[in-house]
Image (cartoon, rainbow, N blue to C red):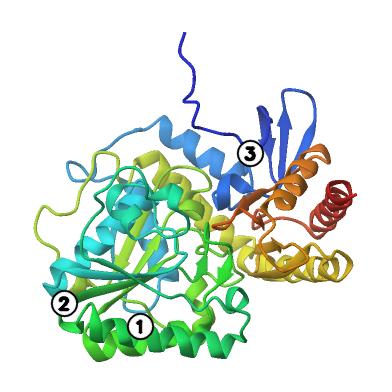
């Protein structure tokens, strides 16, 4: 008899029977409010009828049409729709299956296009678990330890984590940009640096929005030195932050955008987008993959983007996110265990701290588990595991936000009593 790997630890004991919208119906008969969305994947909620219908129809036509062998209509339609929301000038798209694959495709492109060997990522970032992606990841040692050597040519620069340092945001940005400049002077000469890669909101690193001034500073340095600016929108993109792309808050244009997670409401598909000029510098044969751009996943992606547009879900993410944030800010004033609340849109993090302001992972875990008893599903994150992340579906309702806040409040009371 086979079993799942013992290393796979479930955050909750829930076994799903079926799900719809923001709700998971478990085999034990309970109905859970899902504020995890598969780690930000089910962007249009569970089993949105339009997404389900599109996938069902496509399954009856063709499931797998390997897209470097034969082309299929859903991928052409998805590419056309992405063209309507991608940053100006990013008009060429390559598809893969997972976020890690897309990350690796982006750094391969940057190295090929520039002829330079080095990539700079930023402290606390999460970019995936495959070897190259893990080499860029510093959200926690669990993602990168135990299988060295990792990929060479990666250098890590400080992230402007103002709360961790006890600074204001401007001071943190100034520090991080100066340290980046010092790294470019002492470790990776600009002429050796192919790309910067950064998340617009750190995901597993603690749900920390990247300050707009820092992204603007990266854009300026990338332009000055001919470095490719890669924005990893795997978790923050597709409306999650109340703008279609997380980097939109900074008013910049990246050279490469990476997208996955919420793009197809749960079907596995990822992509990188760049200008035709930049993408054309990839070496022939360097892009491909058996399952990339799967026909069913692409059809689900087409339906997802249509639902997001038609139901104004980016605007809803902003409005419901503001309501969520107001409730979380109120909780911070009521419970001393909450050291910080941060995030954008429907991507909010609550950091739990001890009386001496050190990370308190035990309380975060206790609250997360108490929330399960309240039939609210949440996840922890951050290097210390002391941050609870709240990731509702983009079509979450105002009533569901208030229900979630009430259940979260009771979970904190239970865990800290």
Visible in this render: residue 84? yes
Q: Give the crowd class for mark 2: few <14, some 14-19, many >=20 residues within 10 Å.
A: some
From this viewpoint, which residue is outermost toward the front?
Answer: 356
Left or right: where does residue 417 sit relative to residue 1? right
Distance from disc 1 to disc 2, alpha carbons, whole Å, reads 14 Å
Upstream in sequence: badge 3 or badge 2: 3
The residue lying at 66 percent from left, 29 percent from top is: 16
Distance from disc 3 to disc 1, alpha carbons, whole Å, reads 36 Å
Upstream in sequence: badge 1 or badge 2: 1
Residue pointed to by mark 1? 180
Upstream in sequence: badge 3 or badge 1: 3
SS of the residue at dot 1?
helix
Which of the numbered marks, if any, corresponds to residue 192? 2
Distance from disc 3 to disc 2, alpha carbons, whole Å, reads 42 Å
SS of the residue at dot 3?
loop
The quadrant in which residue 50 appears is top right
The residue lying at 62 percent from left, 47 percent from top is: 37
Nearer to us in this view, 104 or 92: 104
Residue 413: percent from the left, percent from the top?
A: 89, 52
Residue 410: percent from the left, percent from the top?
A: 88, 50
The residue lying at 47 percent from left, 87 percent from top is: 175
Nearer to us in this view, 370 or 226: 370
Nearest-to-viewer mark from 3 and 1 = 1
Q: Give the crowd class for mark 1: few <14, some 14-19, many >=20 residues within 10 Å.
A: many
Residue pointed to by mark 3? 11
Nearer to us in this view, 142 or 118: 142
């Amino acid at each position: 008899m086979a079993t799942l790997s013992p290393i796979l630890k479930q955050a909750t004991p829930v076994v799903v029977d079926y799900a719809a919208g923001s709700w998971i119906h478990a085999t034990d008969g309970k109905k859970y409010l899902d504020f995890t969305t598969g780690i930000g994947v089910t962007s249009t909620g569970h089993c949105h009828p339009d997404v389900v219908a599109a996938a069902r129809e496509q399954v009856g036509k063709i499931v797998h049409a390997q897209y470097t062998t034969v082309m299929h209509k859903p991928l052409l339609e998805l590419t056309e729709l992405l063209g309507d929301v991608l940053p100006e000038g990013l008009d060429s798209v390559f598809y893969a299956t997972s976020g890690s694959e897309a990350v690796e495709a982006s750094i391969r492109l940057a190295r090929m296009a520039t002829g330079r060997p080095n990539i700079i990522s930023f402290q606390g970032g999460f970019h995936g678990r495959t070897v190259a992606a893990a080499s860029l990841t510093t959200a926690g040692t669990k993602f990168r330890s135990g299988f060295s050597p990792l990929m060479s040519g990666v250098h890590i620069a400080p992230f402007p984590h103002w709360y961790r340092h006890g600074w204001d945001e401007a001071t943190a940005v100034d520090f991080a940009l100066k340290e980046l400049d010092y790294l470019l002077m002492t470790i990776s000469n600009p002429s050796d640096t192919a790309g910067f890669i950064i998340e617009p909101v750190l995901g597993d690193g603690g749900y920390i929005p990247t300050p707009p001034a820092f992204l603007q500073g990266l854009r300026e340095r990338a332009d000055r030195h001919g470095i490719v600016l890669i924005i990893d929108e795997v978790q923050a993109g597709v409306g999650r932050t109340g703008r279609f792309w997380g980097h939109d808050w900074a008013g910049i244009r990246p050279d490469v955008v990476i997208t996955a997670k919420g793009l197809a409401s749960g079907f596995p598909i990822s992509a990188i987008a760049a200008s035709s000029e930049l993408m054309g510098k990839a070496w022939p044969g360097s892009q491909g993959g058996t399952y990339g751009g799967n026909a069913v996943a692409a059809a689900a992606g087409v339906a997802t983007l249509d639902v997001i547009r038609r139901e104004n879900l980016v605007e809803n993410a902003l409005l419901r996110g503001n309501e969520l944030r107001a409730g979380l800010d109120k909780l911070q004033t009521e419970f001393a265990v909450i050291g910080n609340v941060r995030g954008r849109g429907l991507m909010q993090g609550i950091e739990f701290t001890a009386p001496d302001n050190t990370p308190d992972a035990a309380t975060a875990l206790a609250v997360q588990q108490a929330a399960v008893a309240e039939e609210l599903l949440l996840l922890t994150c951050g290097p210390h595991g002391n941050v609870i992340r709240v990731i509702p579906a983009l079509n979450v309702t105002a009533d569901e936000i208030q229900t979630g806040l009430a259940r979260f409040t009771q979970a904190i009371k239970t865990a800290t009593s």
